[in-house]
Image: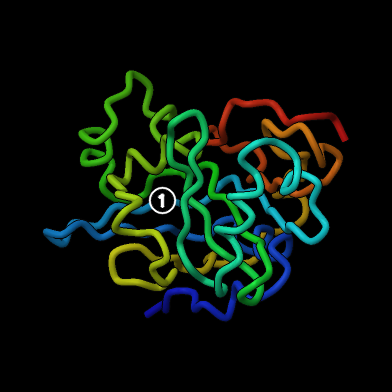
Amino acid sequence: MTRPLAAQFFDRDPVAVARELLGATLVRVLPDGTRLSGRLVELEAYDCPRDPACTAGRFHAARSAEMAIEAGRWLFWTAHGHPLLQVSCRPAGVPASVLLRALEPLEGLGQMLTHRPVTRERDLTNGPAKLVYALGLDPAQISHQSVSSPQLYLLPPQRPLTESEVLVTARIGIGAGQNLPWRFVLRGSPWVSPAAPSMEL
């Protein structure tokens, strides 16, 4: 049986973590035991010691402080009033994280649609706030929990992805650090978010 990724996996450079998480499975277990899961098809890294995006803008100082906890903990950002799921990286005191931007539903599609009704299924989880709502996540219950907690955990990819399967771009919606190639996308996936990168690399 495949074991969930342990906190130690995240205690390092978030850029490497984001690349290796592509294709991993995010599993949400509801209180009644129902499993909702999806394959991660889009992720972004934030590494504040070398990342201009962490120091620019009104809210980024608070975000950076929130990320400076021990590796392998669930965190949420709030953007435009919506929660975005991330996982902390690097040792405590060093703000770094990976943002989960999109996933391909695998289990519990019907339940996800009750959480977030959509006309087109591919719009269900093709964005960071969308996947939070579709999985029925409550930030107050999940924040700071271990990434291997029974209610929300990550299973490693079934196999390493080849370079030809991975599209590397700039991140989405940032005004600083636009030139950093820290967004990783499963090439050709229809579940990737429709937003355009902040700049062409």
Give the colouring mode of the picture. Answer: rainbow
Q: Position of residue 14 (x, y in %)?
A: 69, 63
Residue 103 higher or lower than 50, as above or below: above
Is residue 81 left or right of 9 when viewed as pictured? left
178 sits left or right of 89 in the view: right
Percent from the top left, x then y, of residue 40? Answer: 52, 51
Kindly indicate the quadrant of the structure image that contains residue 124.
top left
Residue under the image location 69 percent in, 48 percent down: 184
Is residue 78 found left or right of 198 in the rendered image? left
Q: Is residue 175 above or below residue 66?
A: above
- Please give left or right for residue 128 compared with residue 106 in the image: right
Q: How many marks?
A: 1
Per the image, label 1 sits on a secondary structure element best described as: strand
In the picture, the quarter occupied by the N terminus is: bottom left
What residue type is disc 1 on? Answer: Gly
Q: Please state which of residues 91 and 111 is positioned toward the viewer in this rendering.
A: 91
Foreground pick, 181 / 53: 53
Q: Tell me if mark 1 has few (under 14), some (14-19) or many (20+) residues whose alpha carbon lies within 10 angstroms of its own.
A: many
Residue 16, quarter of picture: bottom right
Q: Quadrant of the C terminus?
A: top right
At a point 62% along the width and 26% down the height, the residue shown is: 195
* Residue shown at the point (82%, 29%) measured from the top left: 199
**In this view, 131 is above or below 51:** above
37 or 178: which is nearer to us?
A: 178
Question: Camera-side residue: 201 or 66?
Answer: 66
Residue 194 position, x and y percent, is: 59, 26
Quarter-of-image position of residue 83 = top left
Which residue does the numbered mark 1 point to in the structure image?
38
